[in-house]
Image (cartoon, helix red, strand yellow):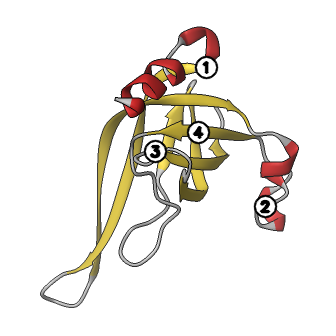
């Protein structure tokens, strides 16, 4: 029940709660040996805020100067790896690339992510 209470708090519009969509791009190799990508738009709920300075400091140097957002969500956002590219969060008309994503340890079932602006609104 704790998780649902936390989700209710995170989803409060006065606290930054919002529904959003993220794009998951996966790469596979065809039978002919060619790289192929496919993408899916996935709905999610969560809390999105401007990323504070301490979170931005953890980003790779090239991303620190970009506009960035901090996201708490039950969705399993990915910064990429293996056959999955970094997720793209569609938010307020822009696309934000997930630069860091980790299980939010204090509250199992949530992801804490920082995403940087890639496509201007």
Dot 2 or dot 4: first in sequence order is 2
Q: Residue at x 78, y 61 (%)?
A: 58
Tell me the CA gap for discs 2 and 4.
Answer: 15 Å
Q: Which mark is residue 110?
A: 3
Q: Which mark is residue 53?
A: none
When the figure is inspected, residue 37 is found, relative to residue 56, above or below; the finding is below
Q: Nearer the viewer, residue 73 or 43?
A: 73
Tell me the CA gap for discs 4 and 1.
Answer: 10 Å
Say if mark 1 contacts mark 2, CB within 8 Å: no
Say if mark 2 contacts mark 4, CB within 8 Å: no
Dot 1 or dot 3: first in sequence order is 1
Q: Position of residue 19 (x, y in %)?
A: 43, 23
Q: Residue at x 43, y 23 (%)?
A: 5
The secondary structure type at the circle numbered 4 is strand
Question: Within 10 angstroms of label 3, few (less than 14), some, or many (20 or more) residues?
Answer: many
The secondary structure type at the circle numbered 3 is loop
Q: In this figure, which residue is indicated by the disc labeled 2?
A: 58
Question: Within 10 angstroms of label 4, few (less than 14), some, or many (20 or more) residues?
Answer: many
Dot 3 or dot 4: first in sequence order is 4
Q: Residue at x 53, y 62 (%)?
A: 79
Q: Residue furthest top?
A: 14
Dot 3 or dot 2: first in sequence order is 2
Q: Which mark is residue 16?
A: 1
Q: Residue at x 35, y 75 (%)?
A: 83
Instruction: Using residue 68 as the reference point, say whether residue 74 is left or right of it.
Output: left
Instruction: Using residue 23 as the reference point, say whether residue 67 is left or right of it.
Output: right
Quadrant of the frame with the C terminus:
top right
Q: In this figure, which residue is indicated by the disc labeled 4?
A: 71
């Amino acid at each position: 029940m704790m998780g649902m209470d936390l989700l209710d708090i995170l989803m409060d519009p006065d606290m930054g709660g919002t529904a959003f969509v993220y794009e998951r791009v996966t790469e596979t190799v065809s039978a002919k040996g060619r790289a192929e990508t496919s993408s899916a738009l996935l709905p999610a709920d969560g809390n999105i805020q401007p990323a504070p300075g301490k979170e931005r400091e953890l980003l790779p140097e090239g991303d620190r100067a970009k506009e960035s957002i901090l996201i708490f969500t039950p969705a399993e956002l990915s910064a990429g790896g293996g056959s999955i590219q970094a997720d793209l969060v569609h938010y307020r008309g822009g696309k934000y690339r997930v630069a860091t994503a980790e299980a939010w340890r204090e509250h199992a079932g949530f992801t804490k992510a920082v995403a940087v602006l890639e496509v201007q609104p």
